Image (cartoon, rainbow, N blue to C red):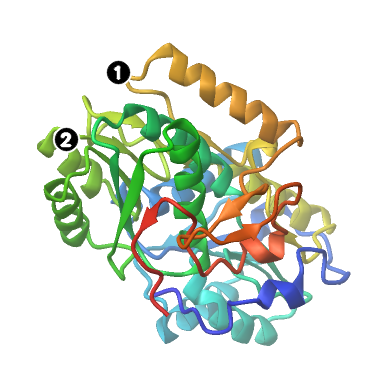
Amino acid sequence: MRKRDVWWGAWLLVGILATGAWAFDPVAPEELKPGFVYIGPVGDGGWTYMHEQGRLAMEQAVPGVKSSIVESVPEGPDSARVLETFARNGSKLIFATSFGYMDFVMDVAKKFPDVVFMHCSGYKTAPNVGVYFGRMYQARYLSGLVAGKMTKKNVIGFVAAHPIPEVVRGINAFTRGVRRANPDATVRVVWLFSWFDPGKEKEATKALVDAGADVIAMHADTGAAPQAAEESGVYVVGYNNDMSQYAPTKHLTAPIWNWGMIYTAAAQEVIAGTWKSTSQWPGLKDGMVGLAPYGKDVPEEVKALVEEEKAKIVGGTWDVFTGPVKDQSGTVRVPEGTTMTDAEMLAFDWFVEGVEGEVPK
């Protein structure tokens, strides 16, 4: 799994600013040879598939660049071998696309100071290591609005991978959207303790339907949950990309990624010799995250509500965790008139009001 380690509060120390300048010589496009380390197969229909689309977009946008991939690399010592092999084979830019690769990236980066490493969703940086992610919580909130309006039973199921802040933050943001649209609705969470397990994802979906959920949401890497929702006759909000192919009549929308903007920019910067270590967290305003097309059953008034809320976020007048924000016990965690800081959001270890379930410690 993506190890929790010292995630909690780490962003308080690291921040999200550049960690310092380090001079890199320009690299010819044909010598860049970007390497991508993937946690799953490119055909998973979700997380890895979207990273692969970003890689292909980079190749198309930066003439002369040809990249390589290694799929289904576990979050353990084997990832260090893959990273080191890329570096020894001449890659000048290497992307590690899952949280659990973090410490291995840091170790290998020390051996190859002239190679740029980019780690997805981590928090540790070095002169030749940058980190990147996106404010997916913003798109999660918008998708929650849709789910809240479409439930009839006021019970929404959430198939969740691992209890790390990334996932907890997404569940909370989704629930904030659900409750904004429908204050009577609740979100029930089932933990998978796995990123990629189609069988578990299907079983969890069916268990939530049996428990009364008539809308399913997810944070998992494949299309198994949408498939199970389609089979069960309930609506589903996908994740990572447009998953309507898995639930052609029941897919409502999905929070989706645009990794290509990160990969293209990094390649261009390394080629130009201008790359610097930063912690990037772009969001809706930047086009890093968004929503997939709506299903045919989503009413126009629901789409209008989404656009109204999106405008507030993009315009900077409000964000998802602007107070008041209560936890499950009803205690105000974020007072009215204040907004959670990035460091606080990046260390989420509690659920907001409206979530049914626990965050395992």
Mark earlier in primary sequence (1, 2)? 2
Quadrant holding the N terminus: bottom left
Mark 1: secondary structure: loop
Residue at the location (77% across, 53% down)? Answer: 269
User: Marks 1/2: CA distance?
Assistant: 14 Å
Q: Nearer the viewer, mark 1 or mark 2?
A: 1
Q: Pick whichever, 143 or 35, lies toward us.
A: 143
For label 2, the residue is 230
- State left or right for residue 74 relative to residue 314: left
For the image, the number of numbered tags is 2
Q: Say above or below: 91 vs 3.
A: above
Quadrant holding the C terminus: bottom left
For label 1, the residue is 297
Please indicate, yes or no, whether residue 115 appears anywhere in the rendered image: no
Please indicate, yes or no, whether residue 299 appears anywhere in the rendered image: yes
Residue at the location (49% across, 82% down)? Answer: 80
Q: Position of residue 57 (x, y in %)?
A: 55, 40
Residue at the location (55% across, 48% down)? Answer: 137
Q: Say above or below: 352 vs 238.
A: below
Instruction: Look at label 2 and name its amino acid.
Output: Glu
Q: Position of residue 58 (x, y in %)?
A: 59, 44
Q: Pick whichever, 102 or 332, lies toward us.
A: 332
Q: Position of residue 38 (x, y in %)?
A: 43, 63
Residue at the location (21% across, 49% down)? Answer: 224
Name the outermost residue toward the top: 300
Mark 2: secondary structure: helix
Q: Are marks 1 and 2 in contact (CB under 8 Å)?
A: no
Give the numbered dot on residue 45. none
Instruction: Look at label 1 and name its amino acid.
Output: Asp
**Mark 1 residue crowding within 10 angstroms, few (<14) / some (14–19) / many (20+):** few
